[in-house]
Amino acid sequence: MPIEILPSLLAADFGYLADGARRAETAGGDALHVDIMDGHFVPNLSFGPDVVAAARRAVALRLNVHLMLTHPDRYVPRFADAGADAISFHVEADCDVAATLAVIRARGLSAGLVLKPATPADAIRPFLGQFDFVLCMTVEPGYGGQSFMDGMRPKIRQVRTLSETAAPHPFPIMVDGGINADTAARCAAAGANQFVAGNSLYSAPDMGAAIAAMRAAATAAFARTPTGSL
Ligand code: DX5
Ligand code: ZN
């Protein structure tokens, strides 16, 4: 399963978002992660569909849109129209989860299910086969620059077990929050293979070197897992 690094636009300079998106592309990011917050599901506000459309014009990178919204189902079509390639939303949201996953897939996009730190791995079980990836939050969603929650690793391992033993096909596991080369390797050892990183990449003097270092650390750790040796 490929290792992917996704710079998070939330950590870019908001005065120069197109430049921030292009920086992620030039540095070798695999996709651009775009955080959408409604000030209700999480206590912060960030971007709307027009910012996703602007990123779409700025880069050819895949756009991975993370909806932190109470009603993600109401906004999926607008983010799809804006040029998202993948849309994830929270299993804790106030919507019909299966129907919302189906709408995202019907638009031809990759559909992701996100778990807050307190939500158990088993929450994805009813939806196995209906999503394309799982995002395990490694901080409370809402803000960049928080510290990685090391206690999430057993849950990542449980999600990887569900991926390998209960799902119709193994699915990628993404982590988001406090990710740097060291914490990416710890998550990879637990079975994660997609890494969202905001501050650690955007504050690096050389984002390309930071992505390469994160990729090398995660690749080595993931290869040592049972999944990595498949
Ligand atoms: C947090 C967002 C993250 C955020 C991560 O709610 O979902 O994507 O950008 O930022 P860092 O990597 O700085 O923790
Ligand atoms: Zn995110």
Image (cartoon, helix red, strand yellow):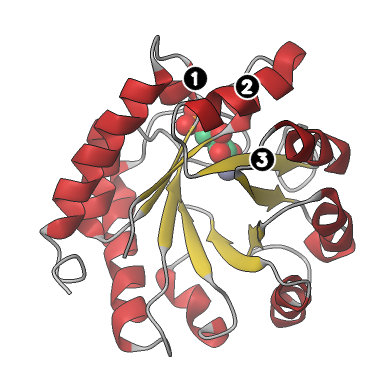
Q: Is residue 71 visible?
A: no
Report the mark closest to the observer, 1 or 3. Answer: 1
Secondary element under disc 1, as helix, strand or loop, is helix
Residue 223: assigned label: none
Residue 20: assigned label: 2
Picture coordinates of residue 230, whole percent (x, y): 17, 74
Picture coordinates of residue 161, whole percent (x, y): 28, 76
Secondary element under disc 3, as helix, strand or loop, is strand
- In this picture, is 60 found above or below 54? below
Picture coordinates of residue 111, whole percent (x, y): 63, 68
Judging by the rendered image, the residue that carries numbered circle 1 is 202
**Alpha carbon separation for disc pair 1 and 3:** 15 Å
Secondary element under disc 2, as helix, strand or loop, is helix
Picture coordinates of residue 185, whole percent (x, y): 22, 43
Q: Which amino acid is tagged 1?
A: Tyr
Q: Which amino acid is tagged 2?
A: Gly
Look at 73% across and 42% down and name the residue there: 36
Look at 63% across and 28% down and name the residue there: 21
**Alpha carbon separation for disc pair 3 and 2:** 14 Å
Residue 35: assigned label: 3
Look at 72% across and 72% down and name the residue there: 108
**Alpha carbon separation for disc pair 1 and 2:** 8 Å
